[in-house]
């Protein structure tokens, strides 16, 4: 779930952001702060005062509704380099045929890791 912790604010100038996907740019014209709440197997996770830029147009297919910066992800403990290491600690083979061709968060994260490691 999410809640606004500040009103949506119009920026003085439109910003152009890039680097999320090849050839993709976003025009950002507003910002807002959110409080995100996630229910997990370990309990509730709250990310408070997450500053978000609001794109003038919808995000491209496959991106979801929210792009979170690397700094925010690192702050909550996500490390793309450790994802495959932690997965290997659980098991050595993952058969993804059971997903039925659907792209899941794990599969998307693995694609991100592949790009990180191949640089």
Image (cartoon, rainbow, N blue to C red):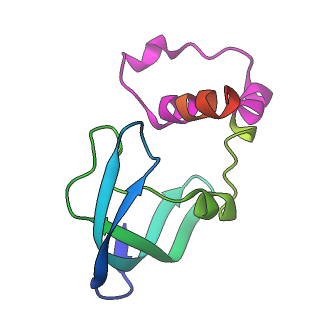
Q: Is residue 115 found inside the magenta-colored segment of the image?
A: no
* Residue 64 in sight from this viewpoint: no
Which quadrant is home to the C terminus?
Answer: top right
Residue at 27% in and 39% down:
61
List the single residue furthest toward the left. Answer: 57
* Residue 53 in sight from this viewpoint: yes
Residue 8 or 88: which is nearer the viewer? 8
Above or below for 78 versus 46: above
Question: Where residue 31 appears, x then y in whole percent?
Answer: 34, 77
* Residue span colored magenta: 84-110
Above or below for 9 versus 83: below
Above or below for 4 versus 119: below
Q: Is residue 107 left or right of residue 82?
A: left
Q: For residue 55, what is the image quadrant?
A: bottom left
Residue at 35% in and 79% down:
32
Residue 11 or 113: which is nearer the viewer? 11
Residue at 59% in and 30% down:
115
């Amino acid at each position: 779930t999410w809640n606004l912790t500040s009103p949506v604010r119009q920026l003085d100038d439109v910003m152009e952001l890039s680097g999320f996907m090849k050839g993709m740019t976003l025009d950002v014209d507003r910002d807002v702060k959110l409080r995100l709440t996630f229910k997990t197997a370990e309990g509730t996770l709250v990310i408070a005062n997450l500053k978000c830029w609001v794109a003038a147009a919808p995000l491209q297919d496959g991106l979801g509704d929210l792009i979170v910066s690397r700094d925010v992800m690192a702050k909550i403990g996500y490390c793309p380099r450790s994802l495959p290491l932690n997965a290997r600690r659980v098991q050595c083979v993952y058969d993804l045929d059971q997903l039925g061709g659907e792209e899941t968060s794990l599969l998307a994260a693995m694609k991100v890791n592949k790009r990180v490691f191949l640089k």
